Amino acid sequence: MSEYITHDRRGRSVGIVQKKYFTFAYPPHLFPLECGAKLGPITLAYETYGQLNADRSNAILILHALSGDSHVAGYYSENDPKPGWWDFMVGPGKAIDTEKYFVICSNILGGCAGSTGPSSINPNTGRPYALEFPFVTIGDMVRAQRVLIEHLGIRKLLAVIGGSLGGMQVLEWALRYPEMVHAAIPIATTTRHSALAIAFNEVARQAIMADPNWRGGNYYDGPRPEMGLAVARMIGHITYLSDRALRRKFGRRLQNKSHFSFGFEVDFQVESYLRYQGRKFVERFDANSFLYITKAADYFDVKRQHGEGSLVKAFSKARARFLVISFSSDWLYPTYQSREMVKAMKKNELDVSFCEIEADWGHDAFLIPNEKFEELVHSFLERVSREFEP
Amino acid sequence: MSLSLKDLRFDLQIIASWIEPGSKVIDLGCGRGDLLLYLREHKGVKGIGIEKDEAEVRECIQKGLTVIQGDLNQEVLDYPDQAFDYVILSQTLQQIYTPHLLLPSLLRIGRRVIVSFPNFAHWTIRLDLLLHGRAPKNPQLPYEWYDSPNIRVITIRDFREFIHRLGYRVIREAPVSTYNQDRQGKIVRRWANLRATYGIFMVGKEENGRKNGN
């Protein structure tokens, strides 16, 4: 997921890892979704690193963001060019130390990296679900993850950790299954999307649906809506960076030329970057998944789902210790949105720590190696694991 | 990491000695968290810190403390009534824009408020003003008048009057004279407003049956 190539500044790589699969909700025991529909069977792709200890008290669940997957760390093979998306954070001796913790991450329900989603085969028709795939919510994703966690024999997680859409799942875990979550680290996230965030998502969805190849979502037997998905990704990338990050990274520098082309090919480096990101994304991501997941993010609303309109009431359900982290230049989920959740936690006298990390890289800062950030996560986990009795 | 009492700044040593074991404490402007760490290790105190500096917040979290980065004037508004046994404001009062609004807010969230502040009526400051006509500047108050964060000039006498005017009660007080970069010191018994470099006060509401009763 991460475009950022990372090197091990602390610790080592987890090495070669393997994607695993878990399938449940076979008919007639279908999985009821919040929208009212039922889905099954459901497969979740997941990876684990480290060893579950004897009293099963060292399990950490990592929740991935919109375009992430279960491949958090390590390599799939000797000549795999790129490690998992949070490789700098997870590994032996790293902030989330796989010598101490048993780390799990699963691809979200509705995703396209091994878990059941709109590109999976609908057992009733033998064809990909496409838009017959029911709407899934952040709550549904978490409920499905819980089935996996119980399958792995874990009754209580030491910690749930995630950034962005992953942070929403962290909050959902802490409120839906308070008895299963000892500690929670929501990073660069929000209790609900602002109009600005919904607006960007809507433009991205429109870009996909306006692509003639999208064909009402039934494109799996023909050309894919690659241009639409690429544009959607470009919009995303703008929101993940910041004015300052874009200036530092590209400024107005031209790409491999010293004069304007007076045409519509790439002139500026920033154009080249966005096109490259868009192109790379369509190789690995399904356009319908993008539609479903962004909609789930837009629907996410802690207040409404858990508090009958009150954020304070919503957090009265929580029992976890929290470490809330935001980044100063994140304008997608700005710090004030983290402060809102911290405020509701304080009103419930929850054990909450909050830190706004000064960083230039916008929303994407949580995907970039940063000693301060890694140290925060590391020391908070040390503390909560000392306090944990399963 | 283990911290002994004498590792603390002297005013914090006095404050620490006033805290009942097992109580709930919030430290406003907790800095690197030394007091909270000491109280947790030696008195089993459940503590929370508020600190605006990111680096100090990170240092507190690295020590395993619970701390929130933010402006203390705002952060105290979010706690339920009487959430704490003690609210600590050490060497921060002189930087508060509206102490007369903050103090009631602190006594809403906590049963006792403990305040320490530099005493601007110390004889060296008086003498400096008298002989040289200069604004206070010394090891306790190392800033120039134009860049000092210490916007409130407080004396021990002023503070006592301030508490009475707000209708609160001074429960304990310890005027202290410190030396060796505030690491050591002693309590000043006589001529406190002249001889103490810091004032330390524990403040509460009047007890039941009297004004401002709980």
Image (cartoon, rainbow, N blue to C red):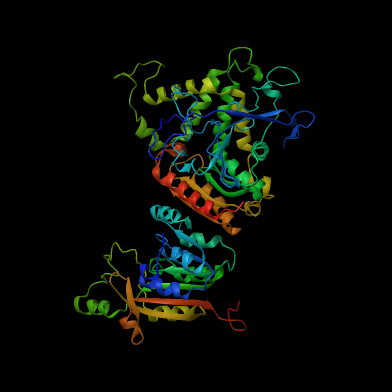
Q: In the rendered view, would you say A59 is above or below B97?
A: above
Q: Is residue B116 rendered to the left or right of residue A53?
A: left
Q: Residue furthest right?
A: A28
- Residue located 49% across and 60% down the image: B74
- Quadrant location of residue B94? bottom left
Q: Horizontal and vertical percent for residue B183?
A: 32, 70
Judged from this view, the residue extending furthest toward the bottom is: B190
| Depth check, front residue: A192 or B196 | B196
Farthest residue to the front: give it.
Answer: A54
Residue at left offset 67%, top offset 50%: A307
Judge by depth and name the residue closer to the eye, A94 or A348. Answer: A94
B156 horizontally vs B134: left or right? right
Q: Residue furthest top?
A: A222
Q: Number of callouts in the render? A: 0
**Percent coordinates x, y for residue A258 in the rendering:** 29, 20
Q: Position of residue A34 (x, y in %)?
A: 72, 37
Instruction: Choose between A93 and A213: the one closer to the eye.
Output: A93
Point 48% across, 42% down: residue: A97
Q: Is residue A37 above or below residue B126?
A: above
Q: Position of residue A80 (x, y in %)?
A: 46, 23
> In which quadrant of the rendered view does residue A264 lie?
top left
| Residue A303 in view, yes or no | no
The vertical placement of A298 against B122, above or below, is above
Q: Closest to the observer: B187 or A235? A: B187
B159 left or right, relative to A76: left
- Judge whether residue A360 can be spotted in this image: yes
